[in-house]
Image (cartoon, grey):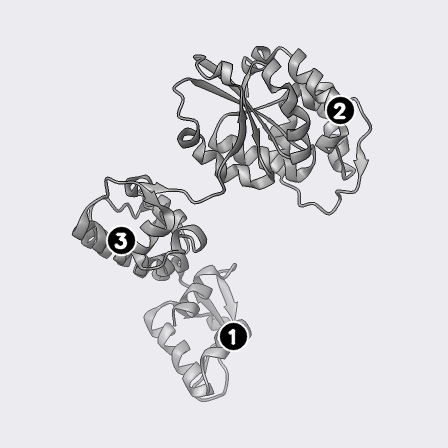
Amino acid sequence: MDEIYRALNGYPKRMIRLSALEAIMGNFFHTYEEYAGFILKLEQEGILEMVKSKGRTTRNPSLAFQYRINKSLLQTGFHQEIQHYRNKFHPSINLDEYYKKDPSIWRHDLPYLIKIDEYIKTFGFPEESVPAPERSFELVQDEKWLTEKGGKELLERIGLFHSFNIIPVSDPLMFAIHPNLVSKETQFHLIVENKTTYQGLLPALPSTEFSTLIYGSGKKIIHSIEQFQDQYPVNAQHHFFYFGDIDREGVSIWHSLNQKIKAHLALPFYKACLEKQPIAGKEYQRQYTEAQEKFISQFPQKEQEQLAMMFSQGKYYPQEILKSKELQEIWRGSDWNRWICKRY
């Protein structure tokens, strides 16, 4: 009956009517007697407390028309269970996050936590790095657990993702190299969201101060950037610039990427877009408020107002609004050191 306990714990109000209880529990019992018996059990345990002023039904067994949910008792048992496993598990497994989570997350994760505990106690932490599906199978006998079933998030929750030396599985990072700049101590890298922009800029790469031009391929860059160090093992101070569509989705991609690496906005390109007329047609896109506010804050006040108006009207600037020749001139002619110094 874990589902019932979770539903009661997540119920938005302290008081609950009998009709609401029936809606929560109705599918779990075949007869009224079974259903009423379970509610009376919750009464005996103190989890449900009758609201006396509302009275009781005349059916047998009799139930209260309204109850008060004692959520502290629901949480007490939950916390005691976590404490039990804290004492039982390997000390490297940190369960603190579960005290703040819904009990359903704990119950979902527990079978995997038991397997991880068994692995650590049997083999310790691996010294060799292997791809995520291989490590996933070793840990829980499911090669898709880490990449598709929340395994990465679970390991991060208990503070052990990096301890298992997991090579992320994502598309390879796609980029072109400026060979003359590979040995520089400070290096610039330009990431562009779309293929057309990548192809338009590529001929100009040898005449810029950038070591690489990276094709982001939309959202894929959020994961593929993890492979940068492996694919470009150059010891230098690396600075990344990003240029994507000025729409809600493009802004969200930059924001997610910026949380993984410091991704400076390639402002000369964005400013050139803002000199043109925006296009209608992105009203359907989901709004990412935090990402949008962070993006707009990178611009001077006048352009902040322009961007806020554009987003409110559902308009956008695609990267393709800048032609290849224009892109190349901006890339060659801008002082990119100036934008490195800008605070984010």
Front: mark 1 or 2: 2
Which is more toward the observer, 25 or 288? Answer: 288
Which is more toward the observer, 180 or 190? Answer: 180
Query: Which residue does the numbered mark 2 point to in the structure image?
Result: 274
Query: Which residue does the numbered mark 1 point to in the structure image?
Result: 18
User: Please, what is the three-letter code of the amino acid marked with disc 1?
Assistant: Leu
Asked if residue 300 shows in the view, the reply is: no
Residue 62: x and y in percent read 45, 84
Which is more toward the observer, 79 or 3? Answer: 3
Residue 269: x and y in percent read 68, 22
Tally the marks.
3
SS type, badge 1: helix
The first of marks 1 and 3 along the sequence is 1
Residue 178: x and y in percent read 53, 19
SS type, badge 3: helix
Quadrant of the image for the C terminus? top right
53 vs 299: above or below: below
Q: Marks 3/2: CA distance? A: 51 Å
SS type, badge 2: helix
The first of marks 1 and 2 along the sequence is 1
User: Please, what is the three-letter code of the amino acid marked with disc 2?
Assistant: Leu
Q: Marks 1/3: CA distance? A: 42 Å
Which is more toward the observer, 269 or 294? Answer: 269
Residue 195: x and y in percent read 65, 35
Query: Which residue does the numbered mark 3 point to in the structure image?
Result: 116
Residue name at image x 45 percent, y 78 percent: 28
